[in-house]
Amino acid sequence: MSITDRPGVTGMVCAACGTEVPIGAGALVCPASSPGDRRHVLHFVDSVAPFRPLDHPNPFVAYRAYLAVDAHGAAIGLDDERRLAVIEQLDAAVARVAGTGFRRTPLTRADRLSAALGFAPEGGIWVKDETQNVGGSHKARHLFTEMVQLLMSEAAGTSRWGGGPRPRLAIASCGNAAIAASTIAAAVGWPIDVFVPPSASQTVLDVLGSLRASVTVCPRRETDPAGDPCVIRFREAVAAGSVPFGVQGTENAWCRDGGRTLGWEISDEMGHRADRIFVQVGGGAFAACVGASLRNSGVHPMLHAVQAEGCAPLERAWRRAIATGGVDNVGARWSECMWPWEDEPRSLADGILDDETYDWIGVVDAMAHTGGSPVVAGEEHIVEAHRLAHAHTGIDVSPTGSAGLAGVLAIRDRIADAETVVVVFSGVRR
Ligand SMILES: Cc1ncc(COP(=O)(O)O)c(C=O)c1O
Ligand SMILES: [Zn+2]
């Protein structure tokens, strides 16, 4: 069977308002979304099909038939060879900047950690090590497909700028997403603006500088409305013509494509052995992607979305969903369920302090379909998970990256010793 015969993504639909968008349209956001109301999020529609990835070390090649960007490329007239070439050439360019292209990341049973947590030999904790991914975190997976979508639209002549000069890319982030975005932008020499808070770490700023990203520090201005000043500046840049190049499905739906490769790798290797998977949640694109990937690979461990007690809008949304009609079909109930966390978000896991879980619908859907649930980890569990990760695995993970493990600690008494539990160490310590 050639790859073009394989069923894959067939379209996009807004999970909030139901608007359908053809996959060839290249839409980044729902047509009903506006700068003043971003409570819309385009999800991909998959055809139900047997899951048969290719055997290839690059996940974007191995799972290409299931990627929305591949369906997009086909819909705008690129043949199979051209689509593969766009992916392979971008990967090679990324490798020149990052020292490595995209390769399947390791997934192994953490024996000492499993023993320390009292698991039986037949169960235990399996760690997916994303610190070895491009840019030191899982974030580049999301941004890769955003860039592929842009490059394919250029190759097919359907980009918004036609043959004219490329608009700049824009992202609001002070950490892993900014580094991943700047790495991919540097790979193709595409100018990028990164909007960071005054608190951004010097280490991250140095990396961004070495990648030639244009960094704008965003203190709050007196005239600013409520909300993160970095996001306000980012939206101003997008309103002025920049391409949104961050990891929030509400700003660029294509981030929710490549993130699924992570879950596909896990299901490929674990099959039906995994009982639960714990994923740390900030803006929610990561967990939404893992959830969506489990669904089309037909493997259903329970998904637990983990937040820190200092910022847990998703868990609140889950409770609100139950109170307003249940956890199925939550899309139409956005304003009843999800709104920004009122208190100053706080945790050592500072990468998951988004005051709003933008991609919450996909995460709630996945928890509902797998019999999972949200977990709120106390700060003591966040700290302890990071300590255990360093004491018992050789992985130099950040506190955000080990926050899924904090979720395991929080509900350890409800997990049987023989269960197989997957966590993703999603980012390196900087
Ligand atoms: C290392 C790491 N893990 C997890 C997350 C959370 O991902 P998301 O914001 O998509 O929920 C982030 C986000 O910044 C991160 O940097
Ligand atoms: Zn919509």
Image (cartoon, helix red, strand yellow):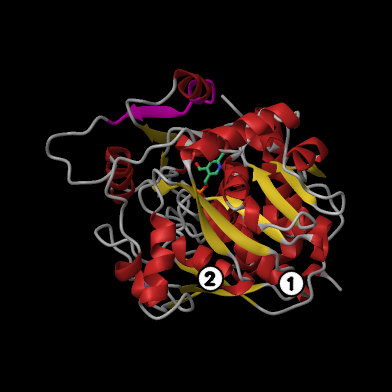
Look at the image and tell me in which quarter the C terminus lies.
top right
Secondary element under disc 2, as helix, strand or loop, is helix
Q: Residues within 10 Å of mark 1 (few under 14, many from 20)?
A: some
**First to last magenta residue range:** 208-218
Q: Nearer the viewer, residue 219 or 428?
A: 428
- Callout 1, which amino acid? Gly
Residue pictured at 82% horizontal, 68% vertical: 52
Q: Residue at x 68, y 57 (%)?
A: 415
The reply, left or right, for residue 287 in relation to residue 246 is right
Which residue is more in the foreground, 15 or 276? 276
Helix or strand or loop: what does disc 1 sit on? loop
Does residue 67 show up?
A: no
- For marks 1 and 2, give the CA distance: 15 Å
Q: How many marks?
A: 2
Image height of 315 relative to 58, above or below: below
The reply to whether the magenta stretch includes residue 421 is: no
Question: Which disc, if any, is residue 365?
Answer: 2
Measured as percent of width and height from the top left, residue 143 is found at: 56, 47
Q: Residue at x 69, y 38 (%)?
A: 133
Residue 8 to residue 262: above or below = below
